[in-house]
Amino acid sequence: MKVGHYTDKKAITGCTVILCENGAIAGVDVRGSAPGTRETDQLRPMNFVEKAQAILLSGGSAFGLDAAGGVMRYLEERGFGHQTSVAMVPIVPAAIIFDLNIGNSKVRPGAEEGYQACLDASDKGVAEGCVGAGTGATVGKILGIERATKGGLGTASQQIGSGIIVAVLAVVNAVGDISNYKTGKLVAGPREEHNKGFLCTAELLKHAYKMQDGLGNNTVLGVVATNAYLTKAQVNKLAQMAQDGIARAINPSHTMHDGDVIFALSYGTKAADVTVLGSIAADLVADAILRAVEKAETLGGIPAIKEVN
């Protein structure tokens, strides 16, 4: 399994591909109310195709779904996909974040950018922060983008038992605040007027604060992968349990203004209990979310957390 990024720091957008060319059993959990997705119905337990050859995460709002075409071209050229009677058809589920409110809204990842992300893919360490689909991510937007904090892309992994690995990649573009779920400390949110700290979105909502227009432009995306063998029903359960990690790290989460999506991939033969994997995955999702804002940098006039004191 390999990860690759296409990053445009000038337009402040990008895309990220998770390649599993020989196919991984795939599932999904869509919990936000403003999702932008492609091929997610194919991953439901009752549907025919069992394996995906890649997962694409992209900026560019719905325009960014076009980048999946470049991933399909890359896979087709190399003979990977779902075998039909007449052609090999790569299965590339995809989801997007809205990043048109930062950088150049006229520049979005397309097929060529998706293809470039595949060429960049490696099984080495994954770059984090303002890269790939996390390039234009922001968080803490109840007061509008002008008071938001920079989000990004983060990863986390853990080995359990006899060599079973659970790994997570998350793109963090939430309307809500980011907290360290182990300590309860607020880490990122809407910035105070003079950049002297963060306000608490939940407290603002308790005072019947009216949300800014255009807040339906947020999403947290994640991919959970394991070398344990899971059935299609079990891998969907893994995605469902992993989604709880968003609620551990982000408040509020799964709102009408977010399109939260978690994909899950089973890419191995080792036996494992899906309940154990799901419990660990939820913590790892929360860890990856925290790393995404910790590794982010200031872009497009939106400060990273290290610039807020």
Image: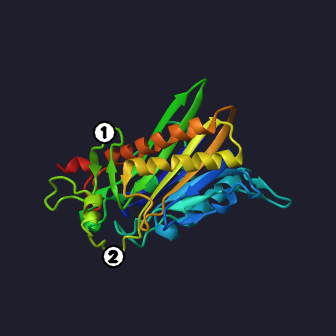
Amino acid type, mark 2 = Asp
Mark toward the start of the polypeptide (2 vs 1): 1
Q: Is residue 295 above or below residue 136?
A: above
In this picture the colour scheme is rainbow
Residue farthest top in this picture: 162
Residue with the mark numbered 2: 213
Residue located at (50% from left, 59% from top):
58
Name the foreground residue: 242 vs 289. 242
Amino acid type, mark 1 = Thr
Q: Is residue 148 above or below residue 226?
A: below
Residue located at (33% from left, 43% from top):
180
Q: Are marks 2 and 1 in contact (CB under 8 Å)?
A: no
Residue 41: numbered disc: none
Mark 2 or mark 1: which is in front? 1
SS type, badge 2? loop
Residue farthest bottom in this picture: 213
Q: Quadrant of residue 40?
A: bottom right
Judge from the rendering whether residue 287 lies leftward or rightward of residue 234; answer left or right. Answer: left
Quadrant containing the N terminus in the rendered view: top right
Q: Is residue 204 visible?
A: yes
Q: Residues within 10 Å of mark 1 (few under 14, many from 20)?
A: few
Residue located at (63% from left, 50% from top):
236
Residue 37 image point, x, y percent: 57, 64
Name the foreground residue: 40 vs 299. 40
Q: Is residue 121 visible?
A: no
SS type, badge 1? loop
Judge from the rendering whether residue 82 lies leftward or rightward of residue 225; answer left or right. Answer: right
Residue at mark 2 to residue at mark 1: CA–CA distance: 32 Å
Q: Residues within 10 Å of mark 2 (few under 14, many from 20)?
A: few
Residue 36 image point, x, y percent: 53, 66
Residue with the mark numbered 1: 183
